[in-house]
Structures are given as C-alpha cells and as structure tokens.
Amino acid sequence: MFIYEGKTVLITGASSGIGEAFARELAQRKMNIILVARSEQKLQNMAANLMTKFRINADIIIADLTQEGSAQRIYNEIKRRHLSIDLLINNAGFGTYGPFEAIPAERKHAEVMLNVVSLVDMTHTFLPELLERRGGIINLASIASFTPMPYMSVYAATKAFILSFSEALWGEYHHRGLRILALCPSATETSFFDDLNQSASTKEPAIFSQKRRPEQVVATALRALEQGKCYTVDGGSNYIVTQLYRFFPRSMTIRGISKMMR
C-alpha cells in the first residue's frame, strides 16, 4: 500500500496535461505538491488553486530541464526550503514528428535532453532520499516504448529507453521498498500534440485521433503504483496493441506503422 496523505510529491512538466492531472489528483489525496516547469505564471495559479481547494502545501520551482545541471539546481532549491520528497514524477517531455532529416538537430537534441538525460539526472539526484523514505518514482514512458516509430524515431527511442531504464531500476530496488513505475499512455488530450506539430508542416497522423483524458491516465498510474508494478499501459485496447509486434516480423510491424504515420 502506498500512503499519500501528508507526503510530498515532485512533478516535472506540471503546468499542463498529465502533470497537471497528477497534481490535482494527488492534492485531492492530501499530498503536498512541488510543481516544476518553465511557466511561472501557470504554476503560481495552479499552486494557489490547489492550496485553496485542497488545504495542502504547494511549492513551485521554475526550471528548464533541457539545461545541464537542472536536476541538481532543483534539488538544491528544495533543500534550501527544508523540503523532502516521497514521490518523484518525471513527467516532462516532448516529441518531434516528421522525416528525420527535416527536424532541426537542436530540436532533436533538446528532445533527448528532456526525455532521457533530465529524467536520469532527476532519478539519480533524488534516489537516495526516496530509498530512505521508501517512496516511489513514476517515469512517463509511452506505448511508443514497445516498437520503433517511423517519423517519430527519436521520440520512440527515448521512450524505449525510459521503459527499459525503469524496469531495470525496479529490479534493483523494489525489494528495498522503493516503487518504480514506467507509465505507458497512448495519445492523450494534452498540449503534446501542439508541440509535436511545431516540427511538422503536416497535420497530426490519424493514428492519434482517439485520445485518452489525462485523468484516466493518472488513475491507471496510481493504481499500478499501489500494486507495485514495474510498468503499466493505459487502456486495455492499448495493451493489446503493444503486444501485437510479438506475433509478426518486426519489419512487417515497422512498415505498417510507417504507413499509418505518413
């Protein structure tokens, strides 16, 4: 059983989408919240709303996780405020879409920095504290973790890393009381697709037309965290999709995805 009340959660990418939904749900469960994102005004408004509505403490930290050393700066700021955390949610991330050569190199570099490097750095920095407090980590992966995705090659590769990394850490630490979960949602109603289309002149692929609500994704995640799972896929039909490639040659699966992504 994972106890929420009176504990503290740190959420990256907290200003909208799944991060915001985590904040609202966990505040409702009486967790104190540390919100991390780049948007100061959004975070200030969120924190004020959460404190008023749920009678919890809400702190904000403005940070750009694509920058080297950001995890340590966040940790230092938390300690300066004499705070500790019990749950880390590495939610910050974005994707690029389009032919690989058409996406600027700096955009792809930022994608890897945010999706992978910052997540590893945040995990490394806060792991000793979370082990001591027998807490938890939720890393935002994706159903794209399970198979390569033409036209989203970098994004899918970063999410495959997150799934593998999270499962490996689960194997290292679950017997020491630390819960580690890779959350694998499908298309979700967030600003992700606004960011995605910054790197493409075409409209989003039809494969993303059916979207889940952030609140559904959060409910799936917290249920899996409480059960001590190492990963979870949001939505029963999505789980089936992640297993299909096991029954077909990889080249056939990748060609099929390529057609759907054009």
Image (tube, rainbow, N blue to C red):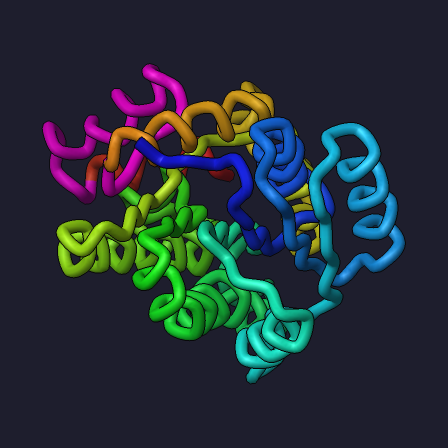
- Relative image position of residue 159 (x, y in whole percent): 38, 52
Q: Residue furthest bottom?
A: 69
Whether residue 239 appears in magenta in the rendering, the answer is yes
- Relative image position of residue 182 (x, y in whole percent): 34, 45
- Relative image position of residue 51 (x, y in whole percent): 78, 39
Q: Left or right: where does residue 244 sit relative to residue 109?
A: left
State the residue at coordinates (37%, 25%). 223
Work out whether residue 96 can be spotted: no
Q: Quadrant of residue 116?
A: bottom left
Looking at the image, is 160 positioned above or below residue 186? below
Q: Left or right: where does residue 4 sit relative to residue 166?
A: right
Whether residue 249 appears in magenta in the rendering, the answer is yes
Q: Residue furthest top?
A: 237
Work out whether residue 45 can be spotted: yes
State the residue at coordinates (44%, 33%). 185
State the residue at coordinates (58%, 40%). 31
Please report the bounds of the magenta region as a residue range: 229-251
Looking at the image, is 17 positioned above or below residue 94? above
Quadrant of the drawing holding the N terminus: top left
Q: Main secondary structure of the magenta part?
A: helix
